[in-house]
Amino acid sequence: MRYREDPKSGHQLSALGFGCMRFPRGLTAQIDKEKSEKLVLAAIEGGVNYFDTAYIYGGSEVALGEILHKNNVREKIYLATKLPHQQCKRYEDFERLLLTQLERLRTDHIDYYLIHNLSEPVFWRDLCELGIEKWLGEKKAAGQIGQVGFSFHGAADAFLSLLDVYDWDFCQIQYNYMNENYQAGRAGLRRAGEKGLPVIIMEPLLGGKLANGLPAKAAKCFQEADSSLSPAAWALRWLWDQPEVTVVLSGMNSDAQLADNLKTAATAAPGMLSAREAAVFPPAVAAFRQAYKIPCTGCNYCMPCPQGVNIPGCFAAYNMSYAAGFVSGMQQYLTSTGVNHPERHSSGKSCVKCGACEKKCPQHIRISKALEDVTRRMEPFWFNTALKLINKLTG
């Protein structure tokens, strides 16, 4: 295992982290604790020391806590989990949620604590009005929280703004070779690196699509370049090649996935890609995007939208719904557009057809018309009813 230093704390973090959202589950959708335990212990044995979970990952905190406690390995790892800020309506909610998490995880402290899906500065301002800065200071002083960060799904300009609203210890972004200019993107990664923040990468394989779901043409690009490397290995190496990347989280749920990722992580180093290897990615990306309906490159030239529409996010989710399936596209749409926020959302429905974006689009996309297509597909007649039900069930 290779390690990269967290410049804020001095911790040596494993280049490969374990994302616990995708623990193996049985037919009843319950976490298979026996399989999960085997994977967690094998990962620790292989040198993985960063484990990421969240309050809303159904059963994940409890399962991970039981595994760590049962095998007495809590102190061998750095533990990360996340505060569901949407459930914080008053100051006391911060404490209530943290205490629940500490109990679930069977620990007295969280090494890396994130504000979950902090996608807009307005959400942080809401939390500050509740007193979160005071609370975080108290928890850090008491040793219950180590490093404070945030995970992000939103537009690039929002990420750059969020970096400056608090003295963060780290951040977590979605980033992979298909999402190079999506959400925080490469520009956000570099800006966080310039500020001295360790950056944790989530969705390095785009929910597995860059491992097992590649179009044949894209897979062929990698196969012809080096048949000894799996598509997943290519995706991880693209990330580790970049010095600003600290930890790459992988939601490993099989022995084979873990073994392949550990093998790749053993060679993880900034600048690891040769010029010949780096040249493989553009044609692979082009092959992947052939299935896309809207030719958006995620350049963000159209942003910011006067109405707050996350144009690249809408298009990326719409395209994903065709390239990788409707469910994957809908998941991306929900996290990228904030349609569940009662006052501020960034879906295509907010478009007033002002045309400001179309004047700046280098791809000459008829954005207003394309947003109508997005809304028609991603917000069908049953969408609002389903969304209200989901919000009610999840709080």
Image: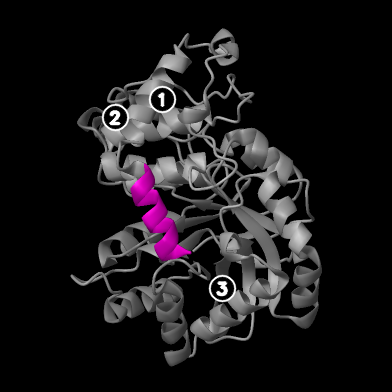
Residue 282 numbered tag? 1
Name the residue nearer the viewer: 368 or 225: 368
> The residue tagged with tag 3: helix, strand or loop?
strand
Give the alpha-carbon distance from disc 1 to disc 3, as whole Å.
36 Å
Q: Looking at the rendering, which quadrant does residue 370 occupy? A: top left
Residue 287 belongs to the span the image colors magenta: no
Q: Position of residue 132 (x, y in %)?
A: 74, 65
Residue located beneath label 2 in the image: 221
In the image, residue 91 lies at what x, y percent? 72, 70
- The residue at 40%/79% (across/down) is 63
Identify the magenta region: 384-395
Q: Is residue 11 above or below residue 266?
A: below
> What amino acid is found at the position of numbered circle 3 in the picture?
Leu
Disc 3 marks which residue?
79
Q: Three-letter amino acid code at disc 2?
A: Cys
Give the residue drawn at x 47%, y 35%: 179
Residue depicted at 33% across the width and 57% down the height: 260
